[in-house]
């Protein structure tokens, strides 16, 4: 598994969402609905889709619930 690059802003940890690339707080749910778990390629966690499935769906304009 690849660790996401953590960005510190005002003492809070942020990463770029691996699905849509928005800046989002670590372990938070992004606007695209991907729950950031701290790992960029985790599967079987809180998200219903794998990261790859979510990236494809997002690129097609589909919801990734």
Image (cartoon, rainbow, N blue to C red):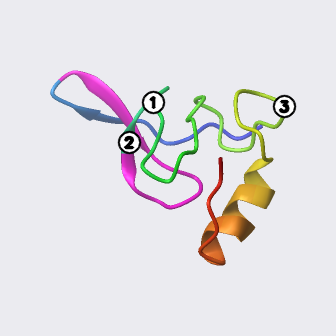
Q: Is residue 61 above or below residue 3?
A: below
Give neighbour class at mark 3: few <14, some 14-19, many 20+ (Cα, 10 Å).
few
Is 28 or 38 nearer to us in this picture?
Answer: 28
- Give the labeled residue for mark 3: 44
Inter-mark Cα distance, 3 to 2: 21 Å
In the rendering, which numbered label is found on residue 24?
A: 2
Query: In which quarter of the view is residue 62 placed?
Result: bottom right
Please say whether residue 41 is one of the residues in the magenta stretch: no
Residue 31 percent coordinates (x, y): 42, 49
- Outermost residue to the left: 10
For marks 3 and 2, the one nearer the N-term is: 2
- Outermost residue to the top: 11
Position of the N terminus by quadrant: top right
Residue drawn at x 71%, y 36% is 47
For marks 1 and 3, the one nearer the N-term is: 1
Residue 7 percent coordinates (x, y): 34, 38
Residue drawn at x 70%, y 27% is 46
Is 8 or 36 nearer to us in this picture?
Answer: 36
- Give the labeled residue for mark 1: 28
Is 17 or 5 nearer to us in this picture?
Answer: 17
Residue 2 percent coordinates (x, y): 70, 41
Inter-mark Cα distance, 1 to 3: 17 Å
Please say whether residue 13 is one of the residues in the magenta stretch: yes
Residue range of the region highlighted in magenta in the rendering: 11-23
Q: Are marks 1 and 2 in contact (CB under 8 Å)?
A: yes
* Mark 3 residue element: loop
């Amino acid at each position: 598994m690849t660790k996401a690059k953590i960005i510190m802003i005002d003492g809070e940890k942020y990463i770029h969402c691996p699905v849509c690339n928005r800046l989002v707080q670590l372990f938070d749910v992004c606007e695209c609905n991907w729950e950031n778990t701290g790992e960029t390629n985790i599967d079987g966690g809180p998200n219903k889709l794998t990261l790859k499935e979510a990236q494809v769906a997002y690129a097609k304009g589909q919801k990734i619930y």
